[in-house]
Image: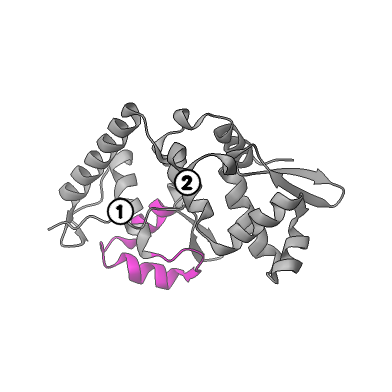
């Protein structure tokens, strides 16, 4: 059975590039921004394959391969189907045949929406952050999301952290580390299992705004 995220990703790829919003386009490039994923796409382009086969070819752990495949499926580059004991992955649509210029080009509406989003983000950061420290934690969920998205960039992707390590990093921003830690989980920016934490979202780490 396909996950909701995989189904959502395939729906996204069924759109024309003109209908894709800024975030959807950026997520495609994020998903492609790993050497192992590019190798997997090339192998799957030859013919559909399952995770265990890819793990053997690339000399990677099955769990690592599964993680990369899910990233590619989430943005609609791959489809997944059940075949006996295996999940078989195949290329989805004709995305890789599209010109790069067609993928990156935004409509005027898309440009305006992206500019408005960035302006709002800058406004929130300037209102709540001084010299890298939080003046206070926003009560409004939308504003808190902006702040938490900035904070989560301090955590390395694909790295596990103990609760003590998480608290140590969060303390650089605000003394109420429990609220920040809980917020990162509630806003699905991090996951937790048995007091071990890790990043879940592909946050754009390049979008850092210096606040004074």
Up the image or down, 153 lies above or below 159; here it is above
Viewer-nearest residue: 10 or 63: 10
The residue located at (48%, 32%) in the rendering is: 17
| Picture residue at 59% right of the left edge, 58% below the top | 38
User: Residue 30: within the magenta?
Assistant: no
Nearest to the observer: residue 60 or residue 189? 60
Q: Residue 89: percent from the left, percent from the top?
A: 72, 48
Circle number at residue 56: none
Question: Mark 2: which secondary structure?
Answer: helix
Left or right of 37? Residue 185 is left
The residue at 53%/53% (across/down) is 32
User: Within 10 angstroms of label 1, few (less than 14), some, or many (20 or more) residues?
Assistant: few
Cα–Cα span, label 1 and label 2: 14 Å
How many marks do you count on the picture? Answer: 2
Q: Is residue 69 shown left or right of residue 18?
A: right
Badge 2 crowding class, 10 Å Cα cut-off, few under 14, some 14 to 19, many 20 or more, is some
**Farthest residue, direction right:** 84
Determine which quarter of the picture holds residue 117. top left
Secondary structure, mark 1, is loop
Please provide percent x and percent y for residue 203: 41, 53
Q: Quarter holding the N terminus?
A: top right
Is residue 151 visible in this depiction of the protein? yes
Which residue occupies 43% across, 40% down? 101
Q: Quadrant of the C terminus?
A: bottom left
Q: Which residue is mark 2?
A: 27
From this view, report whether residue 156 is shown above or below residue 100: below
Magenta range:
155-184
Q: Earlier in the sequence, mark 1 or mark 2?
A: 2
Identify the residue position indicated by label 1 in the image: 207
Asked where in the image residue 59 lies, by quadrant, the reply is bottom right
Left or right of 37 in this view: 21: left
């Amino acid at each position: 059975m396909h996950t909701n995220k995989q189904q959502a990703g395939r729906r996204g790829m069924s759109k024309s590039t003109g209908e894709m919003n800024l975030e959807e386009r950026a997520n495609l490039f994020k998903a492609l921004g790993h050497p192992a994923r590019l190798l997997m796409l090339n192998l799957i382009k030859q013919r559909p394959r399952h995770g265990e086969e890819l793990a053997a070819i690339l000399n990677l752990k099955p769990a690592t391969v599964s993680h990369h495949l899910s990233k590619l499926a989430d943005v609609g580059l791959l489809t997944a189907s059940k075949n006996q004991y295996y999940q078989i992955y195949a290329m989805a649509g004709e995305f890789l045949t599209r010109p790069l210029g067609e993928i990156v080009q935004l409509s005027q509406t898309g440009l305006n929406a992206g500019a408005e989003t960035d302006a709002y983000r800058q406004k929130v950061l300037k209102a709540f952050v001084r010299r890298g420290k939080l003046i206070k934690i926003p009560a409004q969920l939308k504003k808190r999301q902006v702040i938490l998205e900035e904070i989560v960039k301090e955590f390395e992707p694909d790295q596990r952290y103990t609760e003590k390590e998480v608290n140590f990093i969060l303390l650089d921003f605000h003394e109420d580390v429990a609220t920040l830690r809980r917020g990162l989980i509630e806003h699905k920016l991090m996951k937790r299992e048995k007091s071990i934490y890790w990043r879940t979202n592909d946050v754009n780490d390049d979008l850092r705004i210096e606040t004074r």
